[in-house]
Image (cartoon, helix red, strand yellow):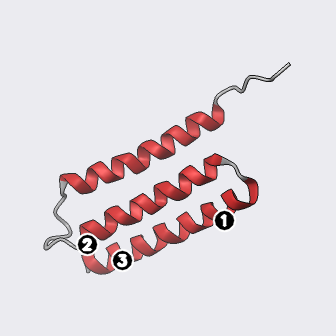
Amino acid sequence: MAQFLLGAITMLSLTIGIFFLHFWKKTADRFFLAFGVAFGIEALARILQASTDRPDDGRPLVYVIRFLAYALILAAIIDKNRPRKTGS
């Protein structure tokens, strides 16, 4: 059952990542690029977790990869809300 759920989460993460990359292609806003890449990284972490002999057992590598994905999302949000300097 855990393998099935990890597969579903992987598929949905990839779908969401493609969705954000589609909007990045239309708008060239790096916020969408960061979110698309972060969800791709999240899918990679789920694939690595599912490929272990005990997918419900937490592996440090999986959590480090997830931390990088969440840090990328946080950096994108901070970058998007940072005040911009206007050129005079």
Residue 22 numbered tag? 1
Residue at 36% in and 64% down: 44
Q: Nearer the viewer, residue 76 or 30?
A: 30
Q: Amino acid at mark 1?
A: His
Q: Residue furthest right?
A: 88
Give the crowd class for mark 3: few <14, some 14-19, many >=20 residues within 10 Å: some
Amino acid type, residue under disc 2 in the picture: Ala
Question: Of the residues shown, which amino acid type is indicated by label 3?
Answer: Gly
Q: Residue 56: x percent and y percent?
A: 20, 67
- Residue 7 got which mark? 3
Judged by depth in the image, the label closer to the viewer, 2 or 1, is 1
The residue at 22%/73% (across/down) is 51
Q: SS of the residue at dot 2? A: helix
Tag of residue 9: none
Q: Would residue 80 be found to the left or right of residue 85 on screen? A: left
Mark pair 3, 2: CA separation: 8 Å
Q: Nearer the viewer, residue 1 or 13?
A: 13
In which quadrant of the rendered image does the N terminus lie? bottom left
The reply to whether dot 3 and dot 2 touch (C-beta < 8 Å) is yes
Residue at label 2? 50
Residue 29 x/y as whole percent:
69, 48
Q: Indicate the secondary structure of the residue bearing disc 1.
A: helix
Vertical order, 74 against 39 (above or below): above
Q: Is residue 21 above or below residue 3?
A: above
